[in-house]
Amino acid sequence: DIQMTQSPSTLSASVGDRVTITCRASQSISTWLAWYQQKPGKAPKLLIDKASSLESGVPSRFSGSGSGTEFTLTISSLQPDDFATYYCQQYNSYRTFGQGTKVEVK
Amino acid sequence: EVQLVESGGGLVQPGGSLRLSCAASGFTFSTYGMNWVRQAPGKGLEWVSYISSSSRTTYDADSVRGRFTISRDNAKNSLYLQMNSLRDEDTAVYYCARDKGGETDFDYWGQGTLVTVSS
């Protein structure tokens, strides 16, 4: 099974900060990686598909990069609505989620 | 508008059974793969099961294989999860989620239904 490891688990940041979250796969997954945002009590929302393809309606401050085993999600200028938990997910073989990164107010 | 609405959650004793349903609308249900994903209280997301559009292919996570069965009825635009031999660790919010295309990521999710396994 493919394991996904996110870092950090928690990130403290301020509005306007540049934020980067890393996701590592236990084996190569090409670019079969998605990023989701989840707010408390809500279902996850798909942000990025195929490692770097922004979903329709997602603000351009979000971007994704990487291939193989190393991936990043970057928020170029953190906005108040972005405080949430972020998950990566591989879909190269079955599906696996990372353990999540909570972006909290510094 | 795509809508996925789960139902069937509740309180069940360890060893018991429960059947979850997900009613789909706003898209051609019969052409999309579907999934169940769960989230234990205060924990992360865990993919549970997948079923292809035709029901020909199903996959399950190791943690539920042999106990849970995913199925669908395309005529009723409905997805199901039959859960048997339930354990405390199956306590979670269960979401149904649509494959974006093929066996991929999930572009639409339901609001979730809570399953509590406790004596």
Image (spheres, coloured by chain):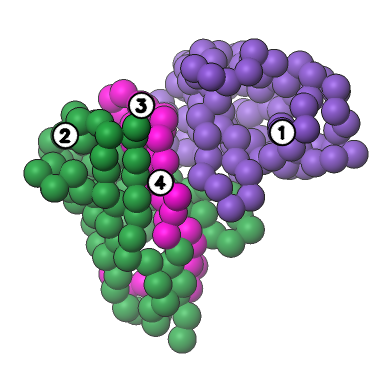
Q: Which residue is mark 1?
A: A81
Q: CA distance from mark 1 to mark 3?
A: 25 Å
- The stretch drawn in magenta includes residue B20: no
Residue B26 percent across, percent down from the top left:
27, 34
Q: Secondary structure at mark 4?
A: loop
Label 1 is placed on what type of residue? Asp
- The answer to whether B40 is drawn above or below residue A105 in the figure is below
Q: Is residue B23 left or right of residue A106?
A: left
Which amino acid does the dot numbered 3 rest on? Answer: Lys
For chain A, give the colour. Answer: purple
- Which is in the foreground here, disc 1 or disc 3? 1
Q: For this rendering, which residue is in front, A3 or A84?
A: A84
In the picture of the structure, the residue carrying the numbered disc 2 is B30
Rate crowding at label 4 as few (under 14), some (14 to 19) or many (20 or more) other CA atoms within 10 Å: many
Identify the residue position indicated by label 4 in the image: B110
Left/right placement of residue A52 relative to residue B90 reads right
Crowding at mark 3 (Cα within 10 Å: few <14, some 14-19, many 20+): some
As helix, strand or loop, the secondary structure at mark 2 comes to helix
Q: Secondary structure at mark 1?
A: helix
Q: Which residue is mark 3?
A: B100
Q: Position of residue B101 (x, y in %)?
A: 31, 23
The answer to whether tags 2 and 3 share a subunit is yes
- Amino acid type of the residue tagged 4 in the rendering: Gly
